[in-house]
């Protein structure tokens, strides 16, 4: 039984990893402020990780799942503070706590929101915004601060019950029965369910010599129209999709200040998680089933969807 410290233990990704790890290991969950965690997870209040005034309990492995993401209008300095400075502070604290391995939950979008080829573990980075650049900078900074023993896990867009981001916006549009002009989109994009990301993170924590960089993505990819149909199925409805020229939609997105979101909807980001598959990892279910499960949660939870988006 390893002693594992996980940052962001109350968050969507960190919470999934902490709950999974707590089944077989002694888990300390790092949180910014006092809040409840599931049974079996020892709460550690760190405060702001970007401020180097915290310590960790004696641990074997640290998994860094906290960070700034899914935000618009953030200054570059704040991206760097929350994602790079915090990573450096955690790496230093992990060394003092005796950790031998440090796993950073980065992002596959260090390769861009769109990519002409197939994204794998060794694809060259090409960040397209301050968020992705800050995550790439955090990777290098953490290696420098911690030394040997760092493993970088780069997830594609993370889905699952409670997920934030563009998937939540699409679910809201589908629930309102609004016809969506996306039937003509012909693309492939990669995703990773949070539960499968958790099993992969724990596999990297447990294996003797993990690869230095691992892409986290479901072996299947999906087109945007098929994604919308799967989400609609989880809501117990059919997706109302209409054909529309992509150039026209792209122009409208630019005028509305949503060009990045349009790239994520229409562009290709095909993934192939070679290293994860070679380690013996496999997802629990099909990507379509995971998408249906994601939207089913929002269709059945007592929490109003608009409140869940805040």
Image (cartoon, helix red, strand yellow):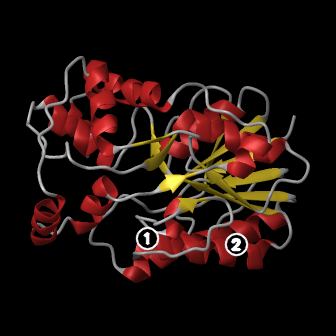
Q: Secondary structure at mark 1?
A: helix
Residue visible at 9% across and 71% down?
255
Return the residue at label 2: 142
Q: CA distance from mark 1 to mark 2?
A: 16 Å
Badge nearest the viewer, 1 or 2: 1
Q: Residue 280: horizontal and vertical position, in percent?
A: 78, 36
Residue 27's tag is none
- Relative to 289, does residue 52 appear above or below in the rendering? below
Residue 62 in sight from this viewpoint: yes
Q: Earlier in the sequence, mark 1 or mark 2?
A: 1
User: Residue lying farthest bottom?
Assistant: 77
Q: Residue 293: horizontal and vertical position, in percent?
A: 41, 24
| Of residues 188 and 67, the one drawn nearer to the viewer in this rendering | 188
Q: Going by the image, does 24 lie left or right of 89?
A: right
| Of residues 58 and 244, the one drawn nearer to the viewer in this rendering | 244
Q: Quadrant of residue 249 in the image?
A: bottom left
Q: Residues within 10 Å of mark 2 (few under 14, many from 20)?
A: many
| Of residues 207 and 282, the one drawn nearer to the viewer in this rendering | 282
Q: Residues within 10 Å of mark 1 (few under 14, many from 20)?
A: many
Residue visible at 73% across and 57% down?
56
User: Residue lying farthest right?
Assistant: 208
Return the residue at label 1: 131
> The N terminus appears in which quarter of the rendering?
top right
Disc 1, disc 2: CB below 8 Å?
no
- Relative to 78, does residue 265 appear above or below in the rendering? above
Residue visible at 77% across and 63% down?
212
- Relative to 127, does residue 179 appear above or below in the rendering? above
Q: Quadrant of residue 232 in the image?
A: top left
Q: Secondary structure at mark 2?
A: helix
Residue visible at 59% across and 40% down?
219
Q: Going by the image, does 27 lie left or right of 126?
A: right
Q: Residue 299: horizontal and vertical position, in percent?
A: 26, 22
């Amino acid at each position: 039984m390893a002693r594992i410290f996980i940052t962001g233990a109350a968050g969507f990704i960190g919470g999934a990893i902490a709950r999974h790890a707590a089944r077989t290991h002694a888990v300390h969950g790092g949180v910014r402020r006092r809040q409840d965690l599931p049974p079996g997870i020892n709460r550690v209040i760190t405060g702001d990780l970007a401020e180097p005034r915290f310590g960790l309990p004696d641990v074997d492995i640290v998994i860094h799942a906290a960070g700034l993401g899914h935000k618009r209008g953030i200054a570059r300095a704040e991206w760097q503070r929350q994602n790079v400075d915090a990573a450096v502070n955690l790496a230093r604290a992990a060394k003092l706590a005796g950790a031998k391995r440090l796993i950073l939950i980065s992002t596959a979008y260090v390769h861009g929101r769109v990519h002409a080829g197939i994204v794998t573990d060794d694809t060259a980075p090409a960040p397209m915004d301050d968020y992705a650049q800050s995550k790439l900078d955090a990777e290098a900074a953490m290696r420098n601060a911690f030394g040997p023993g760092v493993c970088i896990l780069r997830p594609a867009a993370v889905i699952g019950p409670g997920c934030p981001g563009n998937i939540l916006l699409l679910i809201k549009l589908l629930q309102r029965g609004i016809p969506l002009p996306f039937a003509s989109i012909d693309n492939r994009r990669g995703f990773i369910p949070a539960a499968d990301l958790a099993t992969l993170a724990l596999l990297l924590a447990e294996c003797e010599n993990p690869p230095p960089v691992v892409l986290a993505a479901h072996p299947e990819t999906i087109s945007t129209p098929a994604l919308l149909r799967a989400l609609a199925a989880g809501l117990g409805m059919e997706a109302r999709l209409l054909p529309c020229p992509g150039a026209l939609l792209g122009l409208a997105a630019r005028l509305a200040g949503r060009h990045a979101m349009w790239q994520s909807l229409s562009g290709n980001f095909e993934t192939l998680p070679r290293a994860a598959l070679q380690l013996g990892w496999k997802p629990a279910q099909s990507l379509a089933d995971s998408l249906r499960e994601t939207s089913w949660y929002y269709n059945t939870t007592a929490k109003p969807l608009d409140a869940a988006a805040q």
